[in-house]
Image (cartoon, rainbow, N blue to C red):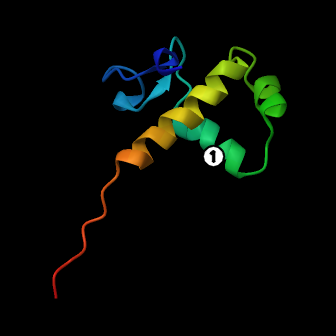
Amino acid sequence: MKNRIEIDPKVMAGKPVIKGTRIPVYLILDLLAAGKGTEEILKEYPNLREEDVVAAIEYASGLLKREEILKAEV
């Protein structure tokens, strides 16, 4: 699914978007967090496919898996 996400400095200031669109990954995640279902999102954004919504979730999950929390020394 990673091939559904692209990062291009010329598109949306380099934020990750669904390939071939200007729809940022964060928008899809925000809609899901607001309680919208995949079907609702696809109706609002007809150029998206279900695979795009899944790819956005997988992309965010992958970022969080690699995130490191640094504990400050006191």
The image quarter containing residue 56 is: top right
Crowd around label 1: few <14 · some 14–19 · many ≥20 (10 Å): few
Q: Is residue 36 above or below residue 8?
A: below
Image quarter in which the C terminus is found = bottom left
Q: Position of residue 5 (x, y in %)?
A: 48, 21
In the foreground, 50 or 13 = 50
Q: Position of residue 19 (x, y in %)?
A: 50, 15
Q: Is residue 21 above or below residue 28?
A: above
The image quarter containing residue 51 is: top right
In the foreground, 68 or 13 = 68
- Which residue lies at the image location 65% right of the left edge and 28% below the top edge? 53
In the foreground, 35 or 46 = 35
Q: Is residue 43 above or below residue 64?
A: above
The image quarter containing residue 10 is: top left
Q: Position of residue 54 (x, y in %)?
A: 64, 29
Q: Residue furthest left?
A: 73
Task: From the viewer's perspective, tell me whether residue 41 is left or right of residue 24.
Answer: right
The disc labelled 1 sits on which kind of residue?
Answer: Asp
- Which residue lies at the image location 25% right of the left edge and 74% below the top edge? 71
Task: From the viewer's perspective, tell me whether residue 66 is left or right of residue 46.
Answer: left
Q: Tag 1's secondary structure?
A: helix
Q: Which residue corresponds to mark 1? A: 30
- Which residue lies at the image location 52% right of the left edge and 17% below the top edge? 4
- Which residue lies at the image location 47% right of the left edge and 21% below the top edge? 2
Image quarter in which the N terminus is found = top right
Q: Residue furthest front?
A: 65
